């Protein structure tokens, strides 16, 4: 855990010096950053040259000893640079996966070609030509090994591509959305449960990469579409994590629990029994994907450093409390009401906004005709929710969807122009024309029929209201947790039962 925390801090830590370099160097920032990366590479390589190179283990040896991390970590720290470049381009620069992987791979090529010659220089050796030749051999061998390793992944992705193409051409995705909507009856929680079950079925027997491609292409759009109809606006990364979690659970769920069957083969146990035990153990954390949907703070989306640290601490406590509540054991064996109370405490720590919204609603209702006024009065950085109602382009049936309109800088007219929404107030109804091409909501509203007899209109406007920080809910939740611990500690002292 310390490694991943340190690595994440390193990846995000480069954001600020990179911003300073970009502001200071201007158009030359790319050259300056390349030089700085090479300096960091040279420094880490100099550190690696102070220790012996790692030697591969002999697979035929009778005994193979694991190396001591404290003695070998210096020899490979520079191999973290391509990963940092990849994560930086993906998460900070928001570049495409292909472009991010290209630059990380290019850096890795440079490392393979130059690591041996530079180490030879740092160690005072003169065999430069041989070192460069060995580096060229490392690059060629790496390309060969990479091509061989991609055969399995390529076949899996090709198979998944056939499924995705079939869904795209036949419209099965829309049918699945209609099926989930029919079975859930419009209930948001039931919709998510249905999506989870379908993702579990779709993920059976698929390797991880193909699993993700299939469930994300089939089910992610269902959550986004039906969630918007129910007033739930979810970042796409949270939706993908939700469906991917349940897709991966297929690896431990009978009758096609490949991971469980592999574990049973190693342990010598019954395959079906192992699968069911693994499935029930996995259910201990089944609340997490739902929390990803309703509390995106756990994914560190739009949070400050202080909020991120607070989320890390409270989420760690919440998952431990949730596990204690579902297992029936906290400091000692829990009674039924204590287990229920522990689950409620975990819920309050996971979703403080749910409790705070019941105390102080986060939005106030505004008449649709006053939308332009509310948009002009909102502060920069606020978000206004619009519920749009109108006929469906394919079926003609009336449907609703929710739009989340971020408030930018400028006057009301400038903000309205930036949104691309075209409105017309007639007879007390705020009608909408088709949004401008390329505007932020042109894709979101493309399924509405703007040219039918019934108009597309704004059914409801919710402007942001003043609300106390949701983190205040943590205080009574933690006090209640301490009270439960006090009850169990007192019972342990009376009965003499050890913790």
Image (cartoon, rainbow, N blue to C red):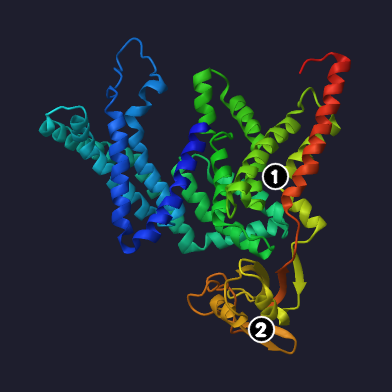
Q: Position of residue 131 (x, y in %)?
A: 15, 32
Indicate the secondary structure of the residue bearing disc 2: strand
Residue at 46% x, 39% y is 7
Which is nearer the eye, 444 or 22? 22
Q: Residue furthest bottom?
A: 427
N-terminal label among 2 and 1: 1
Q: Residue furthest top?
A: 62
Is 307 on the left-hand or right-hand side of 321? left
Which is nearer the eye, 421 or 260? 421
Pointers 2 and 1 in contact (CB under 8 A)? no
Residue at 49% x, 50% y is 214
The residue where tag 1 is placed is 350
Which is nearer the eye, 239 or 447? 239
Q: Position of residue 188 (x, y in %)?
A: 70, 56
Residue 206 visible in image: no
The residue where tag 2 is placed is 431
Q: Quadrant of the C terminus?
A: top right
Residue at 54% x, 59% y is 173
Task: Bin the neighbour count of mark 1 within 10 Å (Cα to Cα): few under 14, some 14-19, many 20 and up.
Answer: many
Q: Position of residue 264 (x, y in %)?
A: 53, 23
Q: Tag count in the figure?
A: 2
Of the residues tagged 2 and 1, which is closer to the observer?
A: 1
Q: Residue furthest right?
A: 494
Task: Bin the neighbour count of mark 2 within 10 Å (Cα to Cα): few under 14, some 14-19, many 20 and up.
Answer: many
Location of residue 105 with respect to 334 vertically, above or below: below
Is 462 on the left-hand or right-hand side of 236? right
| The quarter of the displayed image where residue 233 is located | bottom right
């Amino acid at each position: 855990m310390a490694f991943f925390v340190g690595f994440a801090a390193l990846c995000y830590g480069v954001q600020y010096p990179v911003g300073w370099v970009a502001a200071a160097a201007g158009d030359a920032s790319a050259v300056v950053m390349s030089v700085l990366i090479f300096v960091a590479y040279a420094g880490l390589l100099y550190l690696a040259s102070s220790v012996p190179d790692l030697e591969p283990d002999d697979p035929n040896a009778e005994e193979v000893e694991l190396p001591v991390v404290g003695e070998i970590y210096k020899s490979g720290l520079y191999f973290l640079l391509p990963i940092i470049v990849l994560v930086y381009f993906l998460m900070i620069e928001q570049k495409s996966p292909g472009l991010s992987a290209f630059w990380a791979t290019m850096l890795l090529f440079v490392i393979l070609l130059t690591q041996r010659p530079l180490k030879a220089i740092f160690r005072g050796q003169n065999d430069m030509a041989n070192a460069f030749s060995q580096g060229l051999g490392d690059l060629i061998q790496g390309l060969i090994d990479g091509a061989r390793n991609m055969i399995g992944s390529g076949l899996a992705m090709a198979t998944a591509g056939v499924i995705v193409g079939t869904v795209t051409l036949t419209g099965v995705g829309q049918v699945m959305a209609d099926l989930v909507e029919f079975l859930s009856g419009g209930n948001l929680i039931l919709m998510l449960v249905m999506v989870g079950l379908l993702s579990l079925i779709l993920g059976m027997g698929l390797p991880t990469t193909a699993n993700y491609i299939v469930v994300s292409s089939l089910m992610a759009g269902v959550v986004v579409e039906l969630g918007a109809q129910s007033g739930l606006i979810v970042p796409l990364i949270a939706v993908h994590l939700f469906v991917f979690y349940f897709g991966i659970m297929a690896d431990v769920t009978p009758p096609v629990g490949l991971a469980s069957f592999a574990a049973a083969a190693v342990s010598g146990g019954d395959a079906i029994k192992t699968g069911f035990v693994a499935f029930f153990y996995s259910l201990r954390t089944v609340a997490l994907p739902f929390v990803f949907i309703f509390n995106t703070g756990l994914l560190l989306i739009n949070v400050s450093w202080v909020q991120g640290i607070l989320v890390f601490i409270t989420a760690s406590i919440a998952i431990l409390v949730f596990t204690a509540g579902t297992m029936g054991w906290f400091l000692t064996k829990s009674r039924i009401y204590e287990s229920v109370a522990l689950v409620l405490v975990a819920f309050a720590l996971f979703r403080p906004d749910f409790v705070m919204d019941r105390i102080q609603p986060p939005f106030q209702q505004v008449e649709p005709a006053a939308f332009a006024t509310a948009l002009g009065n909102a502060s920069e950085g606020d978000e206004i929710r619009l519920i749009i109602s109108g006929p469906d382009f394919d079926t003609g049936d009336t449907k609703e969807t929710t739009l989340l309109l971020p408030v930018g800088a400028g006057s009301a007219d400038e903000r309205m122009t930036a949104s691309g929404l075209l409105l017309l107030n007639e007879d007390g109804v705020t009608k909408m024309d088709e949004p401008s091409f390329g505007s932020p909501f042109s894709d979101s509203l493309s399924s509405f029929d703007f040219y039918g007899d019934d108009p597309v209109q704004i059914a409801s406007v919710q402007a942001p209201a003043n609300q106390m920080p949701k983190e205040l809910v943590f205080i009574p939740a933690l006090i209640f947790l301490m009270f439960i611990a006090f009850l169990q500690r007192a019972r342990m002292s009376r009965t003499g039962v050890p913790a």
